[in-house]
Amino acid sequence: MNHTAKGFELKGQTFPLTVLELESADLAVIEKELRSRIESAPDLFRQLLVVIDLGHVDRTGPEFSLHRLAEMLRSCGCVPVGVIGEDSGLRKHAASAGLSMLSGKGRARAVSPADQRSSDPNRGGAVMGTLVVEKPVRSGQQIYAQGKNLVVLASVSTGAEVLADGDIHVYGVLRGRALAGAAGNDAAVIYALGLQAELVSVNGLYQISDELPGEIMGGPARVFRNGDELIFSALTVGS
């Protein structure tokens, strides 16, 4: 009996993507700023999956080329995968640059500080349940709580990375990288009993260790997003 070998399966899967929202059509300006940011946080941008949002720039000028933009991102170590836009004429340019077209209609809405400080762990609506990790997260490990909050009942080592579409709770020292709201949740919060992180990020807005407020470093803290600013707040543990 002849059995045909199975070549592949198609499965739906969600991965965290970073939206690059352009504010300039000048590729030289974009590249200069990008390389500066990469220099300060190289691990964040290494093989970073990027979706390009062109909604705020004039693409008709001679200085702009989507193909050259995609090549520049690749030369910087990023992986451009798509373009956000509703312009049907953009589809041909995206295809020629090796990019897919994505609709921007499903992007996360901005929330108020009051919403961000809500006690409801599922306030964003998309986060369901919690992934609990009982052991320390070692250097080189990556834990991703897809569609969930993440609770680590231990420490996160330097060189480790924890990601969640919801909140991140670290009941130990957070020395590695923590990226909350990875699927587009502005209301996500990072909590740590000892904040010594290499990098913290809420829905793509990040700060590296050199930029973290010295007065809260090492102690219990929470990190949340207020518009285009990350807010760091010390926590009082116990009574």
Image (spheres, rainbow, N blue to C red):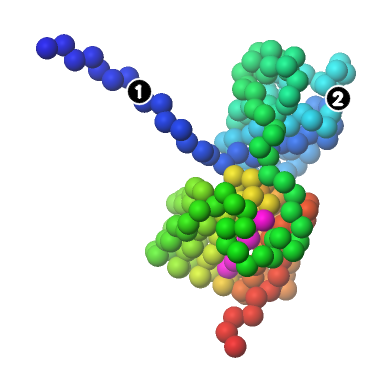
| Residue at position x 25%, y 17% in the image | 5
Mark 2, residue position = 58
Q: Is residue 59 above or below residue 150?
A: above
The answer to which of 115 and 207 lies nearer the viewer is: 115
The answer to which of 107 and 158 lies nearer the viewer is: 107
Amino acid beneath label 2:
Asp
Amino acid beneath label 1:
Phe
Residue 74 in the image, given as x and y percentages of width and height: 63, 27
Lateral position of residue 25 relative to residue 123, left or right? right
Q: What secondary structure is marked by label 2?
A: loop
Is residue 80 visible in the rendered structure shown here?
A: yes
Residue 82 in the image, given as x and y percentages of width and height: 64, 27
Q: Label 2 crowding class (10 Å Cα cut-off): few <14, some 14-19, many 20+?
A: some
Is residue 211 visible in the rendered structure shown here?
A: no
In three-dimensional space, the C-alpha distance between marks 2 and 1, rounded to whole angstroms, equals 41 Å
Q: Which residues are magenta?
A: 187-192
Residue 31 falls in which quadrant of the image?
top right
First reached walking from the N terminus: tag 2 or tag 1: 1
Q: Which mark is residue 8?
A: 1
Instruction: State whether the magenta stretch is mostly helix, strand or loop.
Output: strand
Q: Is residue 80 above or below residue 88?
A: below
Number of marks drawn: 2
| Residue at position x 59%, y 35% in the image | 49
Q: Label 1 crowding class (10 Å Cα cut-off): few <14, some 14-19, many 20+?
A: few
| Residue at position x 50%, y 58% in the image | 150
